[in-house]
Image: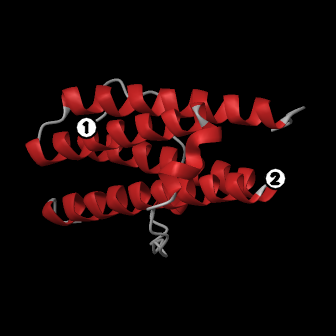
Amino acid sequence: MSFKSFEEIVQFAKDKEKEAVEFYSGLAKNAVFSGARETLEGFAKEEQKHYDMLENLGKAEKALADYKFKWIPDIKRSNYLVDMDDPKDMDYADLLRLAMKREEKALKLYNELLERADREELKNVFKMLCQEEAKHKLSLETMYDDYMAEQGD
């Protein structure tokens, strides 16, 4: 990634969040299990919140005032999976794998943005986004492990 300005970085992140909203909304429509559908719809709403926060970075401090930062464990399940491209004709396990990889990449992006941020309020925004993506990643990895256990894996 090579960006000429912080604004380009933020625009890139906004574009990725918009993609994530569409991705999770699409997965939710095709989810077989109602619990998975609700989880995916929740992820779509969370990604929309992330987009809105990036859209209004100057007002983000207000959203962060009540935010509780905490450590989110990383079970690293997605770290050992290959990248997948096209969600068409994927089964449920493949969709979860694809979603895990997307969250892994989002987490990496926000960690990079955190390193590049030069103002404390921006660092806090990116710390919050790192935590949110880490929660999504952990949730998806847990869903995947549970699903695979049900399948006898």
State the image coordinates of residue 126 (x, y, percent, origin top left): 63, 53
Identify the residue at image location x=54%, y=61%: 79
Q: Residue 116 shows which numbered tag?
A: 2
Q: Can residue 81 be seen at all in this image of the molecule?
A: no
Compared to residue 25, the image places residue 38 above or below, namely below
In the image, residue 28 sits, relative to residue 35, either above or below, namely: above
Residue under the point 78% across and 59% down: 115
Q: Amino acid at mark 1?
A: Glu
Q: Position of residue 141 (x, y in %)?
A: 36, 61
The secondary element bearing badge 1 is classed as helix
Residue 108 relative to residue 140: left or right:
right
Q: Which residue is situated farthest in the right direction here?
A: 4
Label 1: few (<14), some (14–19) or many (≥20) C-alpha neighbours in 10 Å: some
The C terminus: image quadrant = bottom left
Residue with the mark numbered 1: 41
- SS class, disc 2: helix
Q: Nearer the viewer, residue 88 or 23?
A: 23
Separation of residues labelled 1 and 2 (CA atoms): 31 Å
- Tell me the residue at 30%/64% (across/down): 142
Relative depth, front residue between 16 and 127: 127
Q: Is residue 17 left or right of residue 97?
A: right
Q: Is residue 27 left or right of residue 19?
A: left
Q: Earlier in the sequence, mark 1 or mark 2?
A: 1
Identity of the amino acid at label 2?
A: Arg
Residue at the (63%, 59%) spot, across then down? 124
Mark 2 neighbour class, 10 Å CA radius: few under 14, some 14 to 19, many 20 or more: some
Q: How many marks?
A: 2
Q: Quadrant of the N terminus?
A: top right
Q: Nearer the viewer, residue 128 or 35?
A: 128
Q: Nearer the viewer, residue 104 or 148?
A: 104
Residue 133's x, y, as percent? 48, 54
The answer to whether mark 1 and mark 2 are in CB contact below 8 A is no
